[in-house]
Amino acid sequence: MKIKMILPALTEAKSPYWRPIKYSLFPPLGLATLAAYCSEEDEIELQDEHIEELYTEDEPEIVVIQVYITNAFRAYALADQYRRKRCYVCLGGLHVTSLPDEAIQHADSIFIGPGEDIFPQFLKDFRTGKPKKIYSNAERNITSIPPIRRDLIKRSHYLVPNSIVVSRGCPHHCDFCYKDAFFEGGKSFYTQRVDAALAEIDRLPGRHLYFLDDHLLGNYKFSSALFEGMKGMNRVFQGASTVDAILRGDLVEKAAEAGLRSIFIGFETLNNSNLQQSNKKQNLGKDYVAAINRLHSLGVMINGSFVFGLDEDDNDVFKTTVDWAVNNALTTCTFHILTPYPGTRLFKTMEEQDRIIHRNWDQYDTRQVVYKTVGLTPSELKRGYDWSYESFYSWKNIAKASLQHDNVKQVIKHFAYAGGWKKFEPLWNFMIKTKGLNKMLPLLEAILSKVNRHGKETGAPSPFPAIA
């Protein structure tokens, strides 16, 4: 049986903000995970529109399309195209789970929630000629999932082909996060077996790993055992955590000892009222600066995430946030305009308050204003968001943030990473177009060397960034 799996390009990947390197980082791991449930006799093709032109003249028996909010219309168009050719089309993913009534108009079957139990059941039903229209996740368990079909991934097209996920979901419940909608009706945070996670890591070539988990430090027992098992593997890795987890216990030290070199943290806002509005309880009352200093002392770089447009924000929020990030030596920052995704508590609240402006999902990309604002006009919010990126990544502020470190090697490394991530676009584009992006991996592995509090490091500084 011929099965085609497609990740359509996100709208923002084709927008004026298009940065090819940003959308050439990670392969479609979710689809490669589902592919592992197919039989050895099945002919499977996996296509990612971010890194290749889609071939749509074929007629596979089954087409599986992963749907996010800003690729929804593109996904529906592809689904309709294949259905006209009488291919059997399945849609799944975050957006399908949030708006199944919308998605089902473009599919023969839809998958609601995580797919580890759904997809094997669908395949069984399809082979017996009795596929159902709707499949809903019932079991939350990834302790026995088969090894990911990494042979289907075009490794040379990605900077970080060694992406990995060892858990599902997050233990926290922020109002603007998709997670609660996706995991509704069951466990919202669960992990693999430690030995299975270590086996998956062991079969990945090179040194570098990127954990795409929402919260790598979310389960102390699991993460502690994972990091203990990774010691001696000579790995360098990146992941995501919360301020609360960084401050609590010794887990971040264990992570750094195992090879953690860069971490994504959702600071979101410096305003406690905004944190309460967003149900960001894990940040309330936490000492952001203490968490930052702890990470810097371990030689771990920080990518800080911030959201603009919360109800307590005014025109001062942009400069205040950028200055704070620069003065606290955050290596990179990701800024967002508050976006009420369907299926979230934020969307429900704003819908009840008649604050949703439209449902053009292409524009729900965290770069545009899609709701009625408070405290800031839509133009002020958009203008401030754009200014924040320009200001934080100006050479002046890159230099200023770099100089906040205590030793010269950290200063040099910070300057090279932050500058390289935003200022070396022509080089990244050249490597992508010449299909040489994966050749950068040894360099990336080298530059993610640890700089400890004494200024010693195990690799040379480089003009290329750590990806955070």
Image (spheres, helix red, strand yellow):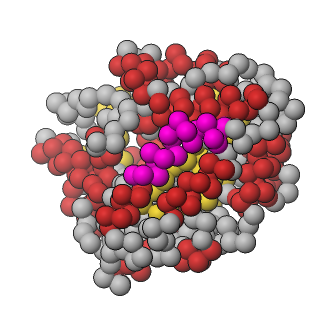
Quarter holding residue 296: top right
The residue that appears at 48% across and 47% down in the rendered structure is 391
Camera-nearest residue between 332 and 39: 332
Q: Position of residue 299 (x, y in %)?
A: 77, 37
Camera-nearest residue between 91 and 180: 180
The residue that appears at 80% across and 49% down in the rendered structure is 294
Q: Position of residue 198 (x, y in %)?
A: 72, 36
Quarter holding residue 169: bottom right
Please state, as top left, top right, bottom left or bottom right, where the C terminus lies in the image: top right
Residue reaching furthest to the bottom: 353
Quarter holding residue 277: bottom right
**Magenta span contains residue 451:** no
Tell me if residue 403 comes above or below residue 459 in the rendering. below
The reply to whether residue 241 is in sight is yes
Is residue 247 shown left or right of residue 351?
right
Which span is picked out in magenta? 386-402
The residue that appears at 29% across and 57% down in the rendered structure is 363
Residue reaching furthest to the front: 396
Is residue 275 shown left or right of residue 115?
right
Please state, as top left, top right, bottom left or bottom right, where the N terminus lies in the image: top left
Is residue 61 shown left or right of residue 84?
right
Q: Position of residue 61 (x, y in %)?
A: 25, 38
**Magenta span contains residue 400:** yes
The residue that appears at 42% across and 28% down in the rendered structure is 425
Most common SS among magenta residues:
helix
Tell me if residue 180 comes above or below residue 108 in the rendering. below
Camera-nearest residue between 87 and 32: 32
